[in-house]
Amino acid sequence: MTLLDDRTSEEANPELEKKAERAESWRGFFVALPTYVFLVLFFVLPLIIIAVISFAERSRTGKPILGEWTLEWWIKLGDPLVRSVTFRSIWLAFLNTAFSLLLGYPFAYWIATRKKAMTRNFLLVLVLIPFWSNFLVRTYAWRTLLDSNGMITKIGEATGLWGKMLFTEPAVFLGLLYGYLPFMVLPLYAAIEHLDWNLVEAARDLYAGAWKAFRKVTLPLSMPGIIAGSILVFIPSLGAYVTPDLLGGSKTTLLGNYIVTQFKSGRNWPFGAALSVTILVIMMIATVIYFKKGGKTL
Amino acid sequence: MSVQQGTAHRPWVDRILSINGWIIFGFLYLPILILVIYSFSDSKVVGIWGGFTWKWYGRMLTNPEMMGALANSAKVAIVSTVVSTVLGTMAALALDRYRKWLGKGAFDVIMYLPVIIPEVTMGAMLLIWFTQVLPINLSIWTIILGHIAFSASFVAIIVRARLANLDDSLEEAAMDLYANRWTTFRRITLPLIIPGVLGGALLALTLSLDDVIITEFVQGPGASLLPVYVFGLIKRQVTPEINAVSTLMLGISMVLVFVSLAFQARANASGSNKEE
């Protein structure tokens, strides 16, 4: 809304009104300008350049050579090794999203349906603390738990159910679940808390059983939260770097650490660029599905 | 709004839900708790209790590399938070308070992209941009630029949400009383949106203090930040000193949570005049 909307003096004169509107439009532009310039310089142009670099030949040191073009890096994405890294990443991100939802939904539902506002707020703060806590530190906690002297390893050995899990795929999965579960719970909580419970009551009045009322009314109404939470978990899981690097081994490389390797010891920047663009495209597809199905609830 | 009597659950459903709830809280908190406990253990091996000691904290405080990284982190966090808060707030104002301007549609899209882009992609593209296109050497300044590039958008989203909840009648009233734009902004708009601005700033601060990936891509030689330095230590060898610095980092996160909750409480109390 503009600040000049209902000023009668200008409404009386269409010429002046037009002029005022033009001035207003320039003001908006100038307010946005510094951020606009910054983002073009340090976001939009780098984004375009990384796509261009993915078609460049690489030099001996692994850097791109501008002016010599090739499709090699995009073809390399079809290699069995690269394919297995990509599928493992998508699979773990999907598995993590599914488990976060399975654990997070009843959890968020429980918090959102406490009768006293005080209780709800207190439990919500308990979710917010891990949500805001340093991610690296939370991942490190699991590294010590899953190591040979870690508590979880000792429990597993005492009961004979599992051994040392560190540097395996289950360890990476546990780390991802632990890291991103709060990202699922918060949007779910918001959706369930704002739900119109009269609709659920109406369903019950019309002789729907508790389970049927949940399935037909509560669950569909909390869909925006489910979709927002799923996206918030899926995207960072897909690009995860810290978790697979600390908890996984050489056999559990995910896209995130595979990309970093290309820029460091792998010495293949153009290939790293192609992988970065790939991960971006997968993420875009997931987000488009989200906006189509869930509406704008981020 | 809360659950009505007609939709209350049967007792056994409620019992299962709360057992499940406390198990998940256990899952979220026990690992952190154990990590903190072992920072006080007088044993070189994390996981074996060797009696109470403060020595790992002493080691941490006298480790010059660790303290240097901490100082760098503070510098980067402060500068990037201030700049991204100003940029993000201006962007939110332009998007919410000015109806139509050149390139608004495109800006609206560009503004949201840094929030949803995977961090590895962002790190890789900034590295290429700084080293292959721009004639800049990687340093603490490239880290700051990288942090601003992702935090400004988060600030803009939060401030914009606040602006959307405030109608502009007060601003119009001020303008009708011949306050100029700057006075109106300073005396009316800014006080109203300040909880949103501070909330955005806290988020920017947290994001900057948490970041590992982007920093690892764009850091220069010798200018590491605390999380990246600790990340390297963990990969080399796990020691109780890492538990000590982790506890310090958790403490900082915790302070930020409570400050942000206090701001939120104040924001809700001061109220947004459209929500009634």
Image (tube, rainbow, N blue to C red):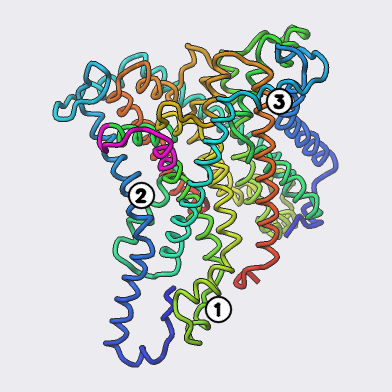
The residue tagged 3 is B57
Chain under callout 3: B
Labels 1 and 2 within one chain: no
B67 left or right of A111?
left
Amino acid residing under circle 2: Leu
| Residue in the image at 66% along x and 57% along y | B264
How far apart in space, not on screen, are marks 3 and 2 (Cα)? 41 Å
Kindly identify which residue carries mark 1: B170
What element does badge 1 sit on? helix
Asked which secondary structure carries label 2, the reply is helix
* Residue B240 belongs to magenta span: no
Residue in the picture at 71% in, 25% down: B57
- The correct choice, above or below, for B81 with respect to B265 in the image is above
Q: Are marks 3 and 1 in contact (CB under 8 Å)?
A: no
Point out residue A247 in the picture as x, y percentages from the top left corner: 57, 18
Are discs 3 and 2 both within one chain?
A: no
Q: Secondary structure at mark 3?
A: helix
Q: Residues within 10 Å of mark 1 (few under 14, many from 20)?
A: some
